[in-house]
Image (spheres, rainbow, N blue to C red):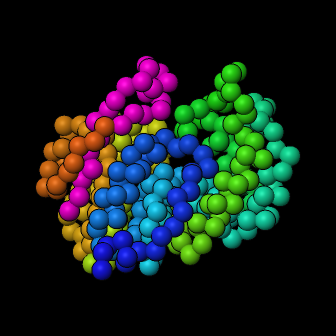
Amino acid sequence: MSIEQTFTPVEAVKPVAAYVGGKRKLAKTISQLILEREHKIYAEPFVGMGGVFLQREHKPKSEVINDVNKELVTFFRVLSRHYPQFMDTLKFQICSRADFERLQHTDPETLTDLERAARFLYLQRIAFGGKSYNQTFGVSPDRPSRFDVNKLTPLLADLNERMNSVVIECLPYLEFIEKYDSPETLFYLDPPYFGTETIYGLNFSRNDFAVLAEALGKLKGRFLLSINDRPEIREIFSSFDFVEVETSYSLARQASGRRKFGELIFMN
């Protein structure tokens, strides 16, 4: 039996919003590496908007995703469990700087889960460069609105269907890895890039790379980790095999024109 036959085919789904560090351009390469490795549990400690998770066209028996961004996890959970009500919450919302700034200054803790999920999606769709922290209003005079419910509806419907049976966690990455590690688990990890740890607004520091490398060295299961190519990263993860790939980053391209950057995919 081929490896493909041990998985269930699924339709690839487009992420519904950009996210800093998203792997849209490398998704096919990473998905193929995932497919080549036998596993019954697929686990992502840093899922973001699901740039790789949603682009896979095969799934194993169990899938679990995780992120410490509570707003993002609330969005996935609400979309999965309260889809009709969530779509009602999005009705009549327009793309405006005033609404963007109002929602930015709204404490999410004061909102219902439906309102909280809608707030997250609205800000994430409109924010410049897919930033999830220190967001700025992103608008281009030569492009249509970034928040159009009519265009979003089919994307959200596809995402809702794809999220059926997916377990959603909101744990620190080490706790998540320890909880789901087994000989049958494959972890795909997309941590913050080296040198850009602070732009996510999350509790991940320069020291966490070494902590993560140590944890991966003790795994019972398998892993793939994608990260920007830096000498420090090569040293920290030197005990693992890796392949070199090239990609481009949306923020860098907007700032300095189209450029290619080196990226590494580590594996055990």
Task: Point out the stretch of residues depicted in magenta.
Answer: 247-268
Q: Quadrant of residue 161?
A: bottom right
| Position in image of residue 105 (x %, y %) | 71, 40
> Is residue 30 shown above or below 81?
above
Residue 212: tell me if it is visible: yes
Is residue 196 toward the left or the right of residue 264 in the image? right
Is residue 138 toward the left or the right of residue 168 in the image? right
The answer to if 198 sits in the magenta stretch is no
Residue furthest to the right in view is: 92
Q: Nearer the viewer, residue 148 or 168?
A: 148
| Position in image of residue 258 (x %, y %) | 42, 24
> Is residue 238 shown above or below 35?
above
| Position in image of residue 61 (x %, y %) | 44, 79
The residue located at (30%, 75%) in the rendering is 2
Residue 178: tell me if it is visible: no
Q: Nearer the viewer, residue 207 or 216?
A: 216
> Is residue 258 shown above or below 117?
above
The residue located at (79%, 52%) in the rendering is 90
